[in-house]
Image (cartoon, rainbow, N blue to C red):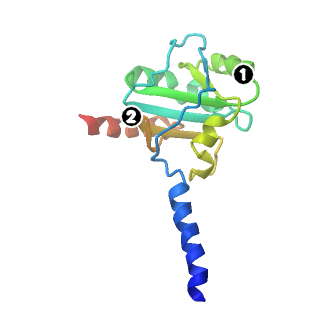
Amino acid sequence: MFSNYIRPILVFLIFGIFSCNNGKSPIIYPEGLEFLSLENTSDSICMTCGNQILIYHNFDESSLYIFSPKFQWAELKRKYPDVGIVSVFEGNDKEFLIKELTKLEYPWPVFYDKNRQFFSLNKFDTVDKKNKNFIPFHLKNGTAIDYAEVGVFPYLEEELNKILKVED
């Protein structure tokens, strides 16, 4: 009788452990993502770079302030030209996104995901982060290896130096 209760609990725990996105999963890019080239950015996103920073952001639920020059995006681009920056934005107003990122001088083109496919395909609802509207990862060959501290440039720089030093 006791084992009848334990078996379903064990199945639930095992399923829960293996179904969660622990931040070390290959990233899936749905076909519906739209590439947006902003003023003063390159015409491509380095999807083949061995080291990347992935930033997912739902701009309907969270401010775009983190993408302002105060967070040293241009410095990141200058100091780490071989690190690809993959930004995926979700929200309802694409024109607002383009206008705001251009005004904020965000230095990379971005992907726009109107249908929230990227979030659900990558199971970001299971990510161990309180704010699920802004999720940054370090990627190694397309696989998430750790969260990225993109809000504080010295911390991000320290993380990148550790990741890049491992390769040398």
Disc 2 target residue: 141
Q: Position of residue 5 (x, y in %)?
A: 61, 81
Residue occupying the point 59% across, 31% down: 30
Front of the two marks 1 and 2: 2
| Mark 2 burial class by Cα count in 10 Å: few <14, some 14-19, many 20+ | some
Q: Position of residue 9 (x, y in %)?
A: 58, 74
Between residue 110 and residue 104, name the one nearer to us: 110
CA gap, disc 1 to disc 2? 29 Å
Q: Position of residue 162 (x, y in %)?
A: 33, 40
Disc 1 target residue: 94
Between residue 166 and residue 6, name the one nearer to us: 6
In the image, residue 101 sits, relative to residue 164, either above or below, namely above
Q: Relative to 146, is 4 on the left or the right? A: right
Q: Quadrant of residue 57?
A: top right
Residue occupying the point 40% across, 25% down: 48
| Mark 1 burial class by Cα count in 10 Å: few <14, some 14-19, many 20+ | some
Q: Residue furthest bottom?
A: 1
Identified by mark 2, the residue type is Asn
Helix, strand or loop status at disc 2: loop
Between residue 55 and residue 123, name the one nearer to us: 123
Q: Relative to 126, is 140 on the left or the right? A: left
